[in-house]
Image (cartoon, rainbow, N blue to C red):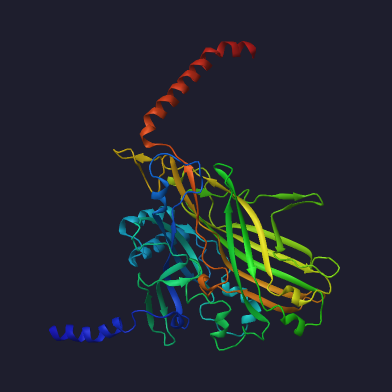
Amino acid sequence: MSYLCVLFCLITLPKVFAKPSSTTAAASELSFLSGVADTTQRFSLRHQEPQITSGGRDDDDLNKVIIERHNLVCFHKGPFQKQKNAYITGYEKCCNEFWLQGLIEAHQKQYCLDRIARIPDVPSPASMLGSLSEGIQITNKDVKPMYYLAVDHEVLQNNDDAAVTFPNYRQIRRVKARDEHRERETIRDLPSHGIASFSPFHLVGFMPGAHGIQQNYVQVVDATSNVLLMNGRVNGTLSPEGGMHRSFRQRVTLSCDGIKWLSTNSSSEKYQMNINAIVLLPLMESVFIDADDPFLVEYHDDSPEPILCRSSLLDNPLLEDGRTILSKSKCKIQFISSETIDIEQPSFASRQYVVAFQIDVTMEFSNSVSSELLQGMQVGIDYSTTLHIRYLLPISKDHTGVSRGSGAYGAMVPIYIQQPTLYSAKLRFVERDNNDSLLTFILDTETPVESHKESAVLDPVVVHVAAGFDNDYWRVTSVTMLSALIGGFMIIKSIDSVSIWC
């Protein structure tokens, strides 16, 4: 028996320790089977509303608090299942996988089942390549995020503490894949050595974009080609007014370079630009968007049609005759939610959601526009929605009178609104007369944001909202019941006069 044990160890140990982890370059050569990822971001807890001045913690204490947000995502390859209960089963499998891979504790599994969100089934970033990838085998073209869960941890740091914020996403992957010989491999990144990621919804090394064409030995994206990479981001700004119903303005910014190609490869002077983009917005359990009325609508005097989004050139140069180079612009946007958003539940009984915005833009340029005027062009797409804040869990206090709870500040509780993510985008220059494609830009989703011109990832929006005190429960209940009894007595007393009047 002992000889069998020794033989078993000699066979299995080399397989266990041969490849404990794979690099990003190696991951691109593997065929994805299944996987989860924990993409972490740290940001400081600082209130943005100066009227908060009493109770709990002072401002210096808040500046020392670091929130560590773990964005947990289950990734899937191929089309989503369409069976009736497939999504419910998927919730359980995903939460169980988070636990098995050590991304959540055992006591957090029920929290995961109650809060996990299903991500809308939108095309993968590699799908934006369209006809550009015809005839090219891209291994992990259909890998997409399927489920999302955000878990926050509060870290109180001292002045000499090494726990500081980091401005970019750090991703820890747990992926099962096959190599070219059909042998299974497992990628497990060390928690202390996370990989820089473009966003929580992009699995590093397994979601190819335009770089995926190069990795398949076909040089398409280069300086002389008609396909180039562009940078992009989304910035969300929450209005300080509105109380529990605040406008949330979002701007998509696309930065392009290499427009000079037009002047050397096209004789046309009539250009049109077509843009397709998808934005993902995670909604924590403390906020929601009304799916029946998701956008803030504007109206223009010249047209009765409602305006849901606007597109423009952020640096719009003028022609010699004073005309702008942009003659016409049309923007369409669609709100996508894969789940019915419950607008009645309080925050402590609600789940998280992920919604998508699908954007299509057409821009026509004035005649005789030289491509030099378009060099370094930046396109801005603006739209707004209303974020509704749910009723929050009452604040409890300890025996010293200090508010307990994550970031509780007197009678105010902070909520963290995640910034939207530009999931995919494509920009095409075409000739207006025959719609021939001249130049295509694809969003670079494989380069970490820290390497982009747009600098670091934007922090979540922190806003403090009033909440009740748990110790006031009986006081509020007594006043409510007394008011109801008095009102009922007055109605009963006036029944006679009501019957006479009828």
Answer with left or right where residue 302 lies relative to residue 205: right
Answer with left or right where residue 161 lies relative to residue 8: right
The one nearer the camera, 120 or 87, is: 120
> Residue sitting at 36 percent across and 34 percent down?
471
> Residue sitting at 42 percent across and 68 percent down?
37
In the image, residue 498 above or below residue 274: above
The one nearer the camera, 316 or 3, is: 316
> Residue sitting at 36 percent across and 40 percent down?
396
In the image, residue 138 above or below residue 106: below
Answer with left or right where residue 245 lies relative to residue 24: right
- Tell me the quarter of the image containing the N terminus: bottom left
The one nearer the camera, 100 or 92, is: 100
In the displayed orientation, state which residue is furthest to the left: 2
The spot of residue 350 in percent (x, y) is 46, 48
The one nearer the camera, 196 or 387, is: 196
> Residue sitting at 65 percent across and 58 percent down?
334
- Tell me the quarter of the image containing the C terminus: top right
The spot of residue 310 in percent (x, y) is 70, 58
Quarter of the view holding residue 126:
bottom right
The spot of residue 468 in percent (x, y) is 43, 37
